[in-house]
Amino acid sequence: MKTYYVGMDVHRASIMIVVLNGAGKVVMQSVIETGAERVRGFLKQLRGKVSVTFEEDAGELLHEVVRPLVTEVIVCDPRHNKLLQSGNKNDRVDAQKLAELLRNGSLKAVYHGDHGVRTLKELVRTYDCLVSDTTRVMNRLKANFRGRAIACGGHDIYRQDRREQWLEKLKEPGAKQRAGFLYEQLAALKPLRHKAKLGDDQRSGAANSLSLAHECAQAGGRERGAADRGSRYAAPVSQPAPVLDLCGIGGGHAQHSRPRGSGWCLASQQAAGVDAGFESQP
């Protein structure tokens, strides 16, 4: 069976592909348009054991497209590929270097979990963004009042049933209208945040169950192996592994700490004020 090592240098409009055989010789190189069908069409030409690599910034979509068509996919971390930082720099050279690193087993892979874990990551990102958006709107609302020397401490200002009372304190028509828009934004964000948190809770519970089942199976296998060998003491059973800490994700937003194994992401102090104050009020 023939063996191929495929390096892809992915850009928004095009992908440079270099293919090495088992001996390390370049057997094919091509530039294709960036798109799922073009990638599938190229990879289907290769018959045998095919390993593919591209850098992490190529995104999740390419991984999903390539995985069913090849033997191995390695999404690599560009920060650890020192060979790419030396010598000439162009798309063909970069793709060939990736293929060479793949063939030599010198790539540092970035973990891409199963579909359930990736869905949980997206839900965490969504909830994180909604919390940040809510905090931003709340800060703007208070700033609107404070800029006119109107005291607005605590969470009473965010209560929808006190909305008209607070708006009456603003005498300027423009400021009053702006505050009204901000109240409408808060009212729209509240159900979205609840929905995202509910989905996060459900996915995280499923991930916890899978993690526990996996650990139990591993522990049972170790104990049976120890018994078969006539060991005096059974191999120690490790504690269930915590679910992945997924909260350090999210493009550009402040990252929050997430207790491992928790159902949803605990927010920052301000965001915690959102759930404890604004959401708890009628």
Image (tube, helix red, strand yellow):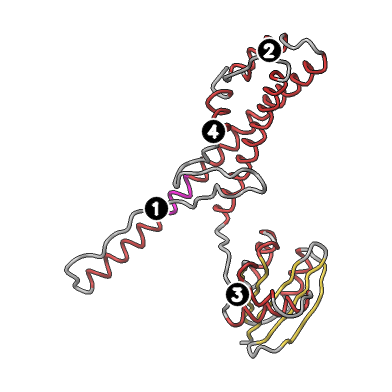
Of pointers 4 and 1, the one earlier in the residue sequence: 1
Pair 4/3: label in front: 4
Q: CA distance from mark 3 to mark 2?
A: 63 Å
Residue 271 horizontal side relative to residue 143, left or right: left
Task: Say what amino acid the circle numbered 3 marks.
Answer: Thr
Callout 4: SS: helix
Question: Residue 269 shows which numbered tag?
Answer: 4
Of pointers 3 and 1, the one earlier in the residue sequence: 3
Callout 2: SS: helix
Is 56 inside the magenta-drawn segment? no
User: Quick one: which residue is furthest to the left in this view?
Assistant: 232
Task: Say what amino acid the circle numbered 1 marks.
Answer: Leu
Of pointers 4 and 3, the one earlier in the residue sequence: 3
Residue 209 horizontal side relative to residue 118, left or right: left
Q: CA distance from mark 3 to mark 1?
A: 29 Å
Q: Are marks 3 and 2 in contact (CB under 8 Å)?
A: no
Viewer-closest of 45 and 94: 94
In the rendered image, residue 97, in percent from the top left (x then y), is placed at: 69, 79
Q: Please name the predominant secondary structure of the magenta segment in the image.
A: helix
In the rendered image, residue 132, in percent from the top left (x then y), is placed at: 64, 37
Question: Residue 71 shows which numbered tag?
Answer: 3
Q: Residues within 10 Å of mark 3 (few under 14, many from 20)?
A: some
- Answer above or below: position of 252 versus 185: below
Task: Say what amino acid the circle numbered 2 marks.
Answer: Trp
Q: Residues within 10 Å of mark 4 (few under 14, many from 20)?
A: few
Q: What span is colored magenta in the figure?
A: 205-211
In the rendered image, residue 241, in percent from the top left (x then y), is placed at: 40, 54
Question: Residue 166 shows which numbered tag?
Answer: 2
Viewer-closest of 61 and 152: 152
